[in-house]
Image (cartoon, helix red, strand yellow):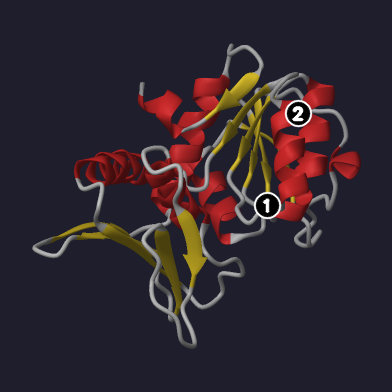
Amino acid sequence: MRAIICGANGAMGRILQDKLPGSIAGLVSLDGENGVPKTFRELGKCDCDAVIDFSHHSAVADVLTFAKESGCGAVVCATGHTAEEKELIYAAAKEIPVFYSGNMSVGIAVLCTLAKEAAAAFPDADIEIVEVHHNRKVDAPSGTANMLFEAVKEVRPQAKKVCGRAGEGKRQKDDIGIQALRMGNVVGIHEIHICTHSQTLTLRHEAHDRGMFADGAIKAAQFLCGKKPGLYTMKDLLK
């Protein structure tokens, strides 16, 4: 499997390069530093199986355009996509295989499954999500927190996302609160609290090493090889 890394000068891009010796078809970085092409046009044509994008959500249009022109898969690992950018992802999946996930950790995929099961088991419980990341993260809530919300929403279709709390006003029955903390060099902590009048169930995942996200992205890129056009997620990888 040969891959192009978009976001090559970032922390995840550098980790991917260390984990894919001899398997890198090309590098792209939005900052254009260290002699790395700034755009796919500068990079030119490359023989590759997948583009792994750990850059910025605003780059997704260029990533998908290149993948479609090259006939390769796209692993979209950036988070914080706008509604318009998500539509580009869904449209591209009709032409090429696209792997899209708010978190590339297998552990988070398991957490989402457990969150859905717990929400179904306690239909009247209050549910709150807390996520913690390093002080350089630009989007909030995190893509993973949104994944957890969507997992709960599968069994609670009436659920309403409430990001942060301030002022006066009671918590509404269908609220799913999400709190985002930004501090230090925390890789990533996600908790989901399912609370009834008599008990609380807390599910927690903590990332210790950013390398796990790179491992997940590589597995996703390998998974896409030979796949038909479509939108794939961690659920498909786990199967």
| Residue positioned most to the right | 41
* Disc marking residue 91: 2
Q: Amino acid at mark 1?
A: His
Q: Residue at x 59, y 11 (%)?
A: 226
For residue 109, side relative to residue 37 (left or right):
left
Q: Residues within 10 Å of mark 2 (few under 14, many from 20)?
A: some
Residue that carries the numbered disc 1 in the rendered image: 81
Query: For the image shown, how many numbered marks are present on the structure?
Result: 2
Residue 100 at least partly seen: yes
Nearest the eye: 22 or 172: 172
The x, y position of residue 150, in whole percent, is: 46, 45
Q: Residues within 10 Å of mark 1 (few under 14, many from 20)?
A: some
Looking at the rendering, in which quadrant would you find the N terminus? top right
Q: Give the answer, above or below, for where 105 lies relative to 124.
A: above
The x, y position of residue 236, in whole percent, is: 44, 24
* Disc marking residue 57: none
Looking at the rendering, in which quadrant would you find the C terminus? top left
For residue 193, side relative to residue 128 (left or right):
left
Q: Give the answer, above or below, for where 59 lies relative to 221.
A: below
The x, y position of residue 215, in whole percent, is: 43, 40
Cα–Cα gap, marks 2 and 1 = 14 Å
